[in-house]
Image (spheres, rainbow, N blue to C red):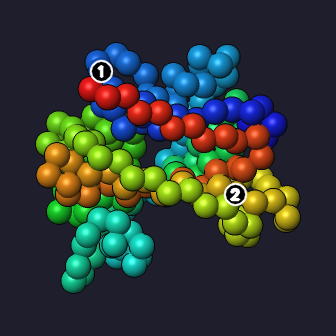
C-alpha cells in the first residue's frame, strides 16, 4: 500500500454483507490481487472520549463499546480501525464480545435495526504518534491520514463512530454518491 496508489471508496463498508459474501476489505483487496485481513486487538466497554461522545450524541456517563482492529494488506499493517458503539446498543451483543462477528458488525447492526442512512466522514493528516508508528511500522517522520466516520440510522440517530488511522503513503480516498 505504501506506494500502490490504492483508491478507497467508503460505500461498501457501510452496506451489510449478504449470506456468504466476504467482508468489504477482504473483497476489495482480492479484487486487486491482494490478501486483506484484520486482527482484533481489543474489545471492551469504556468511557467515551469527548470526540466519540459528541459523534454518538451521548451525554452524562458516555459508556461505549469499542472494537479495535489492525488492518493488514498482504501481511503488512496499513491501518488502525477503532469502532465505537453506544453501550445501550452494543452491550450483550456480539459487538461487545471478543472475536469475529458472523456476517460482520455492519450486518449485525442492521439486524438490530441500525442500518446506515447517513454517513459523515472527515479526513485529516498529522504526524503519527509513537504507538501508531510502532503498530503500523512507520518511520519517525511519517504522517498518517485519519478518517473519522459517523454512521446514522433512518431517524438521524448516530450508532457508530469509527476512527481509521491509515498509512498515508500511497493512499487516495475516493467518494461516490448515487441517487436512488
Q: Residue at x 26, y 69 (%)?
A: 57
Element class at badge 2: strand
The percent coordinates of residue 8 (x first, y second) are 58, 35
Camera-side residue of 64 and 125: 125
Residue receiving disc 2: 144
The correct choice, above or below, for 166 with respect to 65 in the image is above
Left or right, 152 with respect to 34, comes to left
Residue furthest to the bottom in view is 60
- Tell me the crowding category of disc 1: few under 14, some 14 to 19, or many 20 or more residues within 10 angstroms, Cα based: few
Q: Position of residue 134 (x, y in %)?
A: 74, 60
**Residue 8, relative to residue 154: is it above or below?**
above
For mark 2, does the 10 Å Cα neighbourhood hold few (<14), some (14 to 19), or many (20 or more) residues?
A: many
Counting residues from the start of the chain, the first of labels 2 and 1 encountered is: 1
Choose between 11 and 82: the one closer to the eye.
Answer: 11
* Closer to the camera in the image, 117 or 52: 117
Q: What residue is drawn where x is 34% and y is 72%?
A: 54
Name the quadrant of the N terminus.
top right
Marks 2/1: CA distance? 32 Å
Residue 161, percent from left and from top: 38, 58
- Name the image quarter holding the C terminus: top left
Q: Is residue 57 left or right of residue 3?
A: left
The part of the image, by quadrant, that contains residue 35 is: top right
Q: Which residue is mark 1?
A: 18
Q: Quadrant of residue 109?
A: top left
For residue 17, say whether it is visible: yes
> For the residues carrying marks 2 and 1, which lies nearer the camera in this image?
2
The residue at the point 30 percent across, 58 percent down is 85
- Residue at image point 25% right, 42% down: 117
Q: Is there CB contact under 8 Å for labels 2 and 1?
A: no
Q: Which mark is residue 93?
A: none
Residue 25 location in percent, x, y? Answer: 52, 31
Q: Quadrant of residue 67?
A: bottom left
Amino acid at each position: 500500500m505504501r506506494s500502490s496508489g490504492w483508491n478507497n471508496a467508503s460505500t461498501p463498508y457501510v452496506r451489510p454483507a449478504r449470506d456468504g459474501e466476504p467482508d468489504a476489505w477482504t473483497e476489495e483487496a482480492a479484487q486487486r490481487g491482494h490478501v486483506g485481513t484484520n486482527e482484533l486487538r481489543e474489545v471492551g466497554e469504556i468511557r467515551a472520549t469527548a470526540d466519540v461522545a459528541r459523534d454518538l450524541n451521548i451525554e452524562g456517563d458516555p459508556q461505549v463499546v469499542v472494537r479495535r482492529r489492525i488492518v493488514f494488506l498482504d501481511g503488512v499493517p496499513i491501518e488502525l480501525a477503532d469502532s465505537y458503539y453506544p453501550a445501550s446498543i452494543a452491550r450483550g451483543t456480539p459487538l461487545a464480545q471478543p472475536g469475529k462477528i458472523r456476517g460482520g458488525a455492519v450486518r449485525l447492526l442492521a439486524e438490530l435495526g441500525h442500518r446506515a442512512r447517513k454517513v459523515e466522514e472527515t479526513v485529516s493528516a498529522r504526524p503519527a504518534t509513537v504507538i501508531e508508528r510502532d503498530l503500523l511500522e512507520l518511520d519517525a517522520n511519517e504522517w498518517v491520514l485519519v478518517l473519522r466516520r459517523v454512521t446514522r440510522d433512518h431517524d438521524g440517530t448516530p450508532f457508530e463512530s469509527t476512527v481509521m488511522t491509515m498509512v498515508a503513503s500511497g493512499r487516495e480516498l475516493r467518494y461516490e454518491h448515487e441517487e436512488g
